Image (tube, rainbow, N blue to C red):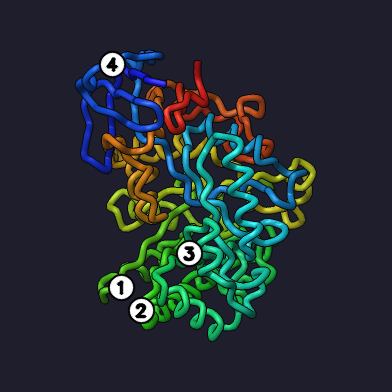
Amino acid sequence: MNIHIQNGRVIDPGNKVDAKQDVFIVDDKIAALGQAPSGFKADKVIDASGLVVAPGLIDLAARLREPGFEYRATLESEMQAAMAGGVTSLACPPDTDPVLDEPGLVEMLCFRAKNLNCAHVYPVGALTVKLEGKRITEMAELMEAGCVAFSQANTPIVDTQVLMRAMQYAATFGFRVWLQAIDPYLSRGGIAHDGEVASRMGLAGIPVEAETVALDAYLRLAKNTGVKLHVTRLSSAAGLEAIDRARAEGLDVTCDVGAHYLHLSDMDIGYFNPQCYVVPPLRSQRDRDALRRGLADGRINAVCSDHTPVDDDAKQAPFAESEPGMTGLELLLPLTLKWAKEQGVALPQALSRVTADAARIMGITKAGHLQPGARADVCVFDPDTLRTVSRDSLKSQGKNTPFLGLELPGVVRYTLVEGRVMFGN
């Protein structure tokens, strides 16, 4: 199908494009910006007057809950959530059931996702078998099956020798390793940031050192092995400072932050609100502000949703007994826009954190930009209109978010995947 998107403000951060111009799509690719290609005849015209036309969003952490946790969400429901959020490519962490540690499981997930013809799913393979931290997986076979990186999800490796061997293996083949910095002993039993709020509420705390101690080990091993290290879901000012020091010493390391960490702190736990129970925990206001600044100045490379749908029963339990996680696929764009407005960050720079920059971290070249010849994954949205977040408005099966009832900017009008309109009229 030939599609003509007209009168929109085209923002393509990867190619430094920010201008009012038309976009022309032929079949599944971007054909041209500005002037129509020779002989072009549109089958469909989308009027983007007053709207922004951008590359489809790329989410570096979205749990789709398949296989194994279909009672929390299904691939179908979360794909619809991705489309409603303008997310056209996403990375799926390996903590499914069974764990994504065998090629057949990865191929099955890719096959199921492809048949739905929605967002492009890029599995992140398990770094160790069953995420147990004892034996490294057959990474080469998992990469051939469709993985883009390797991770332990939220399960740290206790044995640092296993971690070093895994990094050496990955470095040998140029594979990417994504790690969340969390020390298994310093975080053991904890459920909230170790600070005044946790003490007052009688909640077991997780100190910032749980992040920095693990991070120091990761950075040292990455420097010695030469692995391509990406630190996921950074949560503290001290953690960002550790990455700054490593970069000053010449280490090429990237990092991301979950969108909710840009807006919430441990104070938002309020009266034991289980919707604010996440891993790593929401930290102090000082940490939140440091993450906001770090994302603005580019020290933090990308924003992810850390989408984790949880069923109502698991979230209605007392705080300490509830299940951690927030739904976020549909809130990635609004929360990024809200941060940008509050920090005075220009829209092209903000969008880069969820498009071009995220694509570079994932190592994909077909997405994250609107250059002619690129895959026609497009998000058309209204940056100024406010939308109230409600259970009914969320397509995800998981309604677990503390942002319910709040007005957030950024309403997706159309989502196109490979030149097909998957959301919008």
- Whether 412 is drawn above or below 133: the answer is above
Label 1 residue SS:
loop
Instruction: Identify residue type, mark 2.
Output: Lys
Instruction: State if disc 4 and disc 1 touch (CB < 8 Å).
Output: no
Q: CA distance from mark 1 to mark 4?
A: 44 Å
Give x and y (percent) for residue 21. Answer: 23, 22
How packed mark 3 is, by other alpha carbons closer than 10 Å (few <14, some 14-19, many 20 or more), is many
Residue at 60% x, 38% y is 115
Label 2 residue SS:
helix
Q: Of the two numbered discs 4 and 2 on the same chain, state the one appearing first in sequence.
A: 4
Q: Of the two numbered discs 1 and 4 on the same chain, state the one appearing first in sequence.
A: 4
Give x and y (percent) for residue 288. Answer: 44, 53
Instruction: Identify residue type, mark 3.
Output: Trp
Return the residue at label 3.
178
Left or right: residue 264 compared with residue 26: right
- Whether 371 is drawn above or below 142: the answer is above
Q: Of the two numbered discs 2 and 1 on the same chain, state the one appearing first in sequence.
A: 2
Return the residue at label 2.
223
Question: Which label sits on residue 251?
Answer: 1
Q: CA distance from mark 3 to mark 1?
A: 15 Å
Closest to the observer: 418 or 380? 418
Left or right: residue 382 compared with residue 283: left
1 or 4: mark nearer the eye: 4
Instruction: Identify residue type, mark 1.
Output: Leu
How packed mark 1 is, by other alpha carbons closer than 10 Å (few <14, some 14-19, many 20 or more), is many
Instruction: State if disc 1 and disc 2 touch (CB < 8 Å).
Output: yes
Return the residue at label 4.
7
